[in-house]
């Protein structure tokens, strides 16, 4: 099993997807509002929730558009299907595969703990966008993505909240800044940040029971550069700070890092 940060590779891909089609808008009213996009990239993420070690993995993301403003966004380990045919609202089902934690992690202590299986999280998202904010090319957005594990990995839920602002600079550059936070329930928190009696005996860490609440908060920045009408490059940098019971867990406090960084770079083609 490959270890990765549950849901965060998908979240990074989501904002990359959001940035890519910006320059592909067609001004003709009888044409689709965006071109389809397919992109490949690399993303550096913490090995697991609260890890101090990074890993670099491939990232595939894209957006397939249907009639009007409806689309399917493929976001690394997840996907969203927008069913709303409006330029200002988007909503629909979402899914994410959140990889867990196993004995292959770099940290020798964490490797001794019980494995966390892959989570299959399903749910729904809702977002709102306001155009022309602060600048003719500026847009303000706010959204939430609710996900529930259905595979028995953590049997919990998480709610991801995000507020962002995007603006073009010239004809080739577009910069997007987002702030966000994640809330989780007790089951999610205990799975990724708790230390059971068995784990304590295996690893030497003190036993710890984690409860739900605010899990993290942070900021990310996306820079999009349009090479040609069809080709673009996107860079993504994210900083999150773990909070609540997550930051006090021995997994984080003794063996990990409360500061979580994600870096990604991708090349996209619109068609």
Image: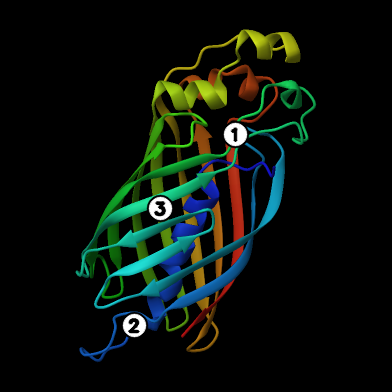
Front position in the image: 105 or 153: 153
Q: Please name the residue that numbered disc 2 is placed on.
A: 25
Q: What SS does tag 2 mark? A: loop
Determine the residue positioned at 31% across, 87% down: 26
Label 3 environment density (alpha carbons within 10 Å; few <14, some 14–19, many ≥20): some
Q: CA distance from mark 1 to mark 2?
A: 41 Å
- With 199 as the anchor, is 10 left or right in this view? left
Determine the residue positioned at 50% across, 58% down: 13
Name above or below for residue 49 compared with residue 67.
above
Using the rendered view, name the quadrant where residue 180 is placed. Answer: top left
Residue 18: x %, y % from top left? 41, 65
Using the rendered view, name the quadrant where residue 79 is placed. Answer: bottom left
- With 149 as the anchor, is 198 left or right in this view? right
Name above or below for residue 270 compared with residue 134.
below
CB within 8 Å, label 1 to label 2 = no
Q: Work out which quarter of the rendered image holds the N terminus and state it.
A: top right
Q: Please name the residue that numbered disc 1 is placed on.
A: 117
Q: Please name the residue that numbered disc 3 is placed on.
A: 178
Name above or below for residue 16 compared with residue 98.
below
């Amino acid at each position: 099993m490959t270890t990765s940060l549950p849901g965060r590779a998908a979240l990074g891909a989501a904002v990359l997807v959001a940035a890519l089609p910006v320059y592909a808008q067609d001004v003709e009213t009888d044409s689709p509002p965006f071109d389809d996009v397919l992109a490949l990239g690399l993303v550096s993420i913490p090995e697991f929730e609260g890890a101090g070690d990074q890993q670099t993995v491939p990232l595939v993301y894209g957006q397939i558009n249907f009639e009007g403003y409806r689309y399917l966004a493929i976001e690394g380990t997840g996907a969203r299907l927008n069913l709303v045919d409006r330029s200002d609202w988007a909503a629909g089902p979402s899914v994410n595969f959140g990889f867990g934690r196993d004995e292959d992690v770099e940290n020798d202590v964490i490797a001794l703990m019980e494995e966390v299986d892959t989570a299959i999280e399903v749910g729904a998202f809702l977002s709102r966008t306001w155009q022309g904010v602060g600048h003719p090319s500026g847009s303000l957005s706010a959204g939430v993505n609710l996900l529930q594990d259905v595979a028995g990995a953590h049997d919990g839920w998480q709610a991801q909240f995000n507020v962002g602002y995007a603006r073009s600079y010239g004809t080739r550059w577009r910069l997007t800044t987002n702030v966000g936070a994640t809330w989780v329930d007790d089951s999610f928190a205990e799975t990724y940040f708790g230390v059971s009696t068995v784990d304590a005996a295996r690893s030497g860490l003190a036993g710890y029971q984690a409860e739900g609440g605010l899990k993290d908060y942070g900021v990310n920045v996306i820079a999009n550069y349009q090479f040609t009408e069809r080709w673009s490059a996107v860079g993504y940098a994210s900083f999150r700070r773990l909070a609540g019971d997550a930051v006090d867990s021995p997994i984080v406090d003794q063996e990990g890092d409360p500061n979580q960084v994600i870096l990604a770079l991708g090349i996209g083609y619109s068609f």
